[in-house]
Image (cartoon, rainbow, N blue to C red):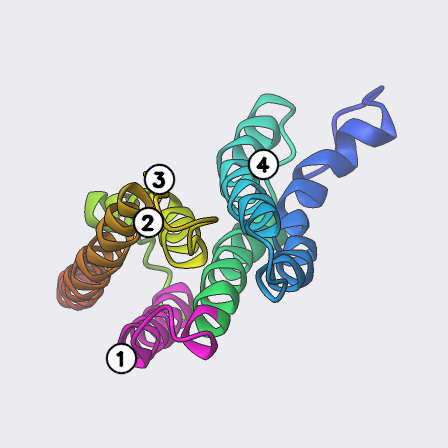
Amino acid sequence: MSTPPNLPRWKQNLPMQLTMSRVYAVPFIIFFLNQSKFFFAILAAVLFIVSSITDYFDGYFARKWKLVSNLGKFMDPVTDKILVLGVLIFLTHKDFLDPYVVILLTVRDTFIGGIRAVASADQIIIDAKSSGKWKAGLQMGAIPALILGKSYHGQYEADYFLEFFKWVGHIGYGLIWVSSLLSVVSAIEYYNIYKNGVVKK
């Protein structure tokens, strides 16, 4: 799609920069997670949330300023996966999370990527499904909760926040598994949509 005339360069670049910011954020999040002080865990959680929110605004500005492109459509889900899987892999390294979740999500994302590629070649459009959106929303809350809950070890013996953050970690852990199950549901939906589209053609 051609760029609208008289659109400032910063506006032309903003949607893609927001998309790519999710990739740029990953090394910083991992750096913060690798520090021992709880303050850095807070920074990691906040940066993950901010990065996740850009997933809404890149598409919003691209549509508003008529900058929707095939590259943007391709990079948007790719950068989402880099952000989520990059952080989850490191959380597994820190024993905050079972590796099974990462394996399940990696297999699902690889499968969906293959389905999308084949569907595109067959000129079949597969829109985002509600289960996939719920999965992404749960991950946006679950991962920061897991980071904060598992990173807080208490400052002294009678630390009343310790029990609170333990529960935060448990909630985050549970939501990660729920999002993983939803990812399987969405993978099945994508496959059925593609299969039905092929039959209709």
Q: Which label's residue is closer to the chain start, 1 or 4?
A: 4
Disc number lying in front (2 or 4): 2
The mark found on residue 100 in the picture is 1
Q: Where does the magenta region start and end?
A: 91-120
Mark 1–mark 3 distance (CA, rounded to whole Å): 29 Å
**Residue 199: horizontal and vertical position, in percent?**
13, 67
For the N terminus, give its image quadrant.
Answer: top right
The mark found on residue 161 in the picture is 3
Asked if residue 187 lies in the magenta stretch, the reply is: no
Mark 3–mark 4 distance (CA, rounded to whole Å): 37 Å
Along the viewing direction, whichever of 190 and 88 lies nearer the viewer = 88
Mark 3–mark 2 distance (CA, rounded to whole Å): 19 Å
Q: Residue at x 60, y 27 (%)?
A: 61
Q: Residue at x 58, y 36 (%)?
A: 58
Q: Which label's residue is closer to the chain start, 1 or 2?
A: 1
Tell me the element at label 3. helix
Residue picked out by circle 4? 58
Mark 2–mark 4 distance (CA, rounded to whole Å): 22 Å
Q: Relative to 9, does residue 79 appear above or below in the rendering?
A: below
Q: Residues within 10 Å of mark 3 (few under 14, many from 20)?
A: few
> Is 84 left or right of 63, judged from the image as shown?
left
Q: Residue at x 34, y 66 (%)?
A: 119
Q: Which label's residue is closer to the chain start, 1 or 3?
A: 1
Q: Which label's residue is closer to the chain start, 2 or 4?
A: 4
Residue picked out by circle 2? 142
Q: Residues within 10 Å of mark 4 (few under 14, many from 20)?
A: many
What type is the residue that disc 4 sits on? Asp
Disc number lying in front (1 or 3): 3
